[in-house]
């Protein structure tokens, strides 16, 4: 839409149009470099996020996404499970020449899916994380369907947003402020670990920690 095509006139976007109007430029005078630049951005975005179909395929493991009729469930997710199997079931090579072996058997994954899609239909009332917590904690799913279990464990640890990273930066700015601008990275690292992973002040046993520190060789040498 920004650069247009044979069927759609270009919109050029708000900021470019404002620039054109403020400088009294003709739309016909816009150089081809704008289009080339935009196409370059599109290609880079597609290169950076090449597996949109793959990520979209992961939704089949959410019981709330299952069709409502048994007839549709019997055919549900066949294309998606094939996409997932191709991604995790084939050897991969990176630019440095490292070879990564498949982590699942893609044919076994497809066979498991025939039963798994029927199995997870019993957990429709739960959201995704709670659904799989209940399945793994109350059934023998991991041993019965090992390939599917590997995929689910991967999904469960993939962050869905950058909120956790943003929180780290926010806490870093609280620790290393203008008055502490000479703080070393190692010290900042320790402070962040304590702040993010440590217990709350209410439950922290200061006396025990002090006794432990006082008896350490480091404190004696000081």
Image: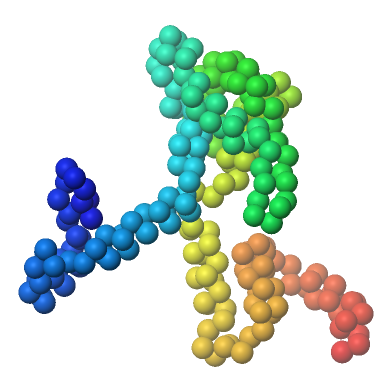
Instruction: Please say whether residue 125 is visible from this viewpoint.
Output: no
- Looking at the image, which is closer to me, 23 or 13? 23
> What residue is at 86 percent from the left and 83 percent from the top?
219
| Tally of marks | 0
Q: Position of residue 101 (x, y in %)?
A: 73, 39
Tell me if 73 is positioned left or right of 175 in this view: left
Q: Position of residue 100 (x, y in %)?
A: 71, 44
- Looking at the image, which is closer to me, 31 or 214? 31
Location of residue 185 by image quarter = bottom right
Location of residue 110 by image quarter = top right
- Looking at the image, which is closer to me, 87 or 27? 27
Identify the image quadrant of the C terminus: bottom right
* Rendered position, 217 above or below 163: below
Instruction: Please say whether residue 19 is visible from this viewpoint.
Output: yes
Tell me if 22 is positioned left or right of 216 in this view: left
Q: Where is residue 55 in the image (x, y as percent from the top left)?
A: 49, 39
In the rendered image, the residue lying farthest to the top is 71
* Rendered position, 92 above or below 152: below
* Rendered position, 181 above or below 205: below
> What residue is at 54 percent from the left and 90 percent from the top?
179
* Rendered position, 144 above or below 182: above
């Amino acid at each position: 839409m920004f650069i247009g095509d044979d069927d759609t006139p270009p919109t050029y976007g708000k900021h470019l149009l404002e620039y054109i109007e403020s400088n009294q430029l003709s739309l016909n005078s816009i150089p081809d470099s704008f289009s080339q630049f935009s196409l370059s951005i599109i290609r880079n975005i597609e290169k950076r996020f090449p597996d949109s179909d793959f990520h979209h395929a992961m939704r089949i493991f959410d019981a709330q996404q299952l069709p409502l009729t048994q007839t549709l469930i019997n055919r549900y997710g066949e294309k998606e499970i094939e996409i997932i199997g191709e991604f995790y079931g084939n050897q991969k090579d990176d630019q440095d020449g490292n070879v990564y072996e498949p982590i699942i058997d893609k044919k076994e994954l497809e066979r498991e899916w025939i039963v798994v899609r029927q199995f997870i239909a019993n957990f429709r009332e739960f959201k995704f994380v709670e659904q799989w917590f209940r399945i793994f904690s109350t059934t023998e799913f991991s041993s019965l369907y090992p390939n599917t279990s590997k995929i689910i464990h991967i999904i469960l640890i993939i962050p869905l947003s950058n909120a956790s990273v943003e929180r780290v930066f926010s806490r870093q700015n609280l620790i290393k402020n203008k008055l502490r601008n000479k703080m070393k990275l190692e010290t900042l690292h320790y402070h962040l670990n304590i702040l993010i992973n440590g217990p709350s002040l209410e439950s922290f046993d200061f006396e025990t920690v002090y006794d432990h520190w006082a008896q350490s060789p480091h404190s004696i040498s000081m």
